[in-house]
C-alpha cells in the first residue's frame, strides 16, 4: 500500500521510478528546444498521467540541484550534462511515453501562448451562476469581447478552456456571420465540428 503514494494518478505504462522520470524530464526539455514553464511540464506529464505529481516535483527539483536542468525566468532548460543523459538513456523510457510527453508539452505550450491572447474571466453572476467574459487582445486592447452566462463553475471552466483553444476561430466565425459570408461560416463550423 505504501508504494501507491508514488504511483497514484499514473496510468498503466506510465513511469514509476525516479530514474525513468529523470531521464524523461531531460529528454522532454531537450526535445522542446526552448524553456518550458513548470505549469507546462506539469500539464503535459500529469495530464497524460505519465508520472505522479509528487515524484515529478521531487525529481524536477533534484535535477536542478544536480546541474542537469536549469531554471531561468520561470522556465526550465536542459544543461549539457542533462542532454548527455537524454542522448545516452532515452531508450530506457518507452518510446510511447516519450512521444506522448513531447506531444503533450507542445500542446501545453500552445495553450499557454493562446491563453496570453485569449483572455477569459469567470465572475459570479447576480442570482447565481457565472458570467464568462471572453476577449481577444492585440497590443493591450480588446479586439473582440463577449460575455456568456453559465449555470455552474464546471461549465464556466469548460467554456473558458474552449475559448482559449478556439478563440481565433470563434472570432472569424462571428465576422463571417456579420458579413453574411455563408461559405466561410460553413467552413469554420465544419472545422470546429471536426475537433
Image (tube, helix red, strand yellow):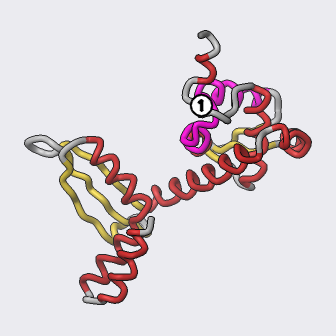
Question: Circle 1 sits on which residue?
Answer: 10
Task: Report the residue at 39% width, 65% height from top.
Answer: 167
Q: Residue furthest top?
A: 2
Image: magenta residue range? 43-65
- Badge 1 element: loop
Quarter of the figure that contains the C terminus: bottom left
Q: Is residue 83 above or below residue 52?
A: below
- Residue 54 among those drawn in magenta: yes
Between residues 118 and 155, which one lies in front from this camera angle?
A: 155
Between residues 47 and 59, which one lies in front from this camera angle?
A: 47
Is 89 displayed left or right of 48 in the figure?
right
Is 173 displayed left or right of 27 in the figure?
left
Task: Report the residue at 31% width, 50% height from top.
Answer: 121
Task: Report the residue at 89% width, 46% height from top.
Answer: 87
* Residue 45 image position (x, y, % from top left): 61, 40
Query: How many neighbours does mark 1 have within 10 angstroms: few (below 14), some (14-19), or many (20 or more)?
Result: many
Between residues 81 and 157, which one lies in front from this camera angle?
A: 157
Quarter of the figure that contains the N terminus: top right
Q: Quadrant of residue 185?
A: bottom left
Is 49 displayed left or right of 29 in the figure?
left
Amino acid at each position: 500500500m505504501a508504494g501507491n503514494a508514488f504511483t497514484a494518478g499514473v496510468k498503466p505504462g506510465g513511469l514509476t521510478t525516479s530514474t525513468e522520470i529523470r531521464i524523461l524530464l531531460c529528454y522532454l526539455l531537450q526535445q522542446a528546444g526552448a524553456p518550458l514553464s513548470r505549469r507546462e511540464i506539469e500539464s503535459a506529464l500529469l495530464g497524460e498521467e505519465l508520472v505522479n505529481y509528487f515524484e515529478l516535483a521531487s525529481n524536477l527539483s533534484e535535477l536542478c540541484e544536480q546541474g542537469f536542468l536549469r531554471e531561468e525566468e520561470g522556465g526550465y532548460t536542459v544543461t549539457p550534462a542533462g542532454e548527455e543523459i537524454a542522448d545516452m538513456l532515452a531508450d530506457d523510457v518507452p518510446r510511447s511515453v516519450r512521444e506522448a510527453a513531447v506531444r503533450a508539452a507542445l500542446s501545453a505550450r500552445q495553450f499557454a501562448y493562446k491563453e496570453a491572447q485569449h483572455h477569459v474571466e469567470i465572475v459570479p453572476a447576480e442570482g447565481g451562476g457565472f458570467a464568462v467574459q471572453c476577449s481577444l487582445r492585440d497590443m493591450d486592447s480588446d479586439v473582440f469581447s463577449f460575455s456568456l452566462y453559465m449555470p455552474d463553475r464546471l461549465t464556466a471552466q469548460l467554456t473558458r478552456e474552449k475559448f482559449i483553444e478556439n478563440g481565433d476561430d470563434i472570432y472569424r466565425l462571428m465576422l463571417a456571420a456579420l458579413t453574411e459570408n455563408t461559405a466561410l461560416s460553413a467552413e469554420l463550423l465544419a472545422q470546429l465540428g471536426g475537433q
